[in-house]
Amino acid sequence: SVVGLADTRDSTFLSVDDGAVEDMSGNRVVAIGSSTAKQVGVYTKDATSPVLAGFDLNMNTGVLTLRFSETVDASTLVGSEITVQNATSAASSDARFTLTGGVASAADEPVVTLTLSVTDLNNLKKLRRVAVSDITTFLRLTSAAIKDMDGNAVVAIADGSALAVGSYVQDVTAPTLVAFDLDMNLGRLLLVFSETVRSGSLVTTNLRLQAASNSPTPGY
C-alpha cells in the first residue's frame, strides 16, 4: 500500500498506455498520459478488517513474526494486546503470557515483526508450560493490536480460538554470567545471568571464588 495513492477519490486517477486494450477490429485504445490522467468515478474505501493469517516465534532471537491477510500499518502495532499461550484455550495464569510491549518493524507490509523486550522474553521463558515447543505455542490478540492502512482494526482472536504457531525456533543460546554480588555479612552470593535460568539446576560446587581474574592459585 502506498500512502497518498488511492486512499480517497481525490487521490485516485488512472493513466492508460495505447497497448492496454484493443477493440474488436484491433484498434488500440486511445492513450491517456500521466499528466491528463482520468479521475475515478466511484471510489469505495477499504472497510475490510485485516486478519492474522499466521505467526512464527523465535525464542532464540525473541522475534515474533505476524502474517496478515493484507498490508497493515506497522506503527499501530500494540504488543500489550497480544497473548502467547500453550493451547487454543488457556484458563490458568501459568498457561499464558500477555506481552507488555516490544519493538515493531518499520515497514508497512502484510508481514510485521515484533522484537520482544528482554523482560518479556525472560518472563515468557520462565513459564515452563508456554512456548517451550511448537505444540505449546499459540497466540491470540484483541482488535486493538493493529490496524490496516485505512484504519480498520484487526479481527480479534479470542481465547478458545487461539492460533497455532507456524514456525517455532527453540532457545539454543547458552546463558552467560553477567555480574555477581557477594555479601560476606549474610553469606549470600547473588548471580545475575543474561536470561532466565532454572534455579534448581544450580550446582554450587561448580562455582569458585578467586583472588583475581587470572589467579594462578585454585579458587574456593
Image (cartoon, helix red, strand yellow):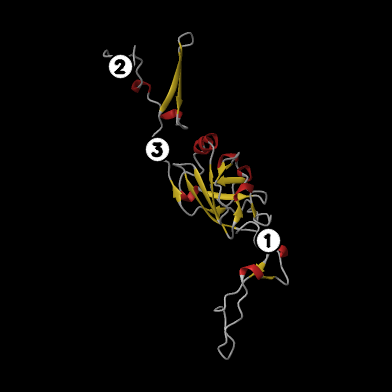
Instruction: Determine the secondary structure under disc 3.
Output: loop
Q: Amino acid at mark 2?
A: Asn
Count of marks overlaid on the render: 3
Real-space CA distance between mark 3 and mark 1, rounded to the nearest whole angstrom: 45 Å
Image location of residue 137, percent across then percent down = 51, 48
Kindly tell me whether residue 161 is visible in this rendering. Answer: no
Sequence order check, earlier mark of 1 and 2: 1
Kindly tell me whether residue 181 is visible in this rendering. Answer: yes
User: Which of the labelled discs sits on residue 173, or is there none?
Assistant: 3
Sequence order check, earlier mark of 3 and 2: 3
Quadrant of the image occupied by residue 42 = bottom right
Left or right, 142 with respect to 216, comes to right
Quadrant (top left/top right/bottom left/bottom right) for the C terminus: top left
For this orientation, the residue located farthest to the top is 185
Figure check: 5 above or below 55:
below
Instruction: Report the residue marked by disc 2.
Output: 214
Instruction: Report the residue marked by disc 1.
Output: 7
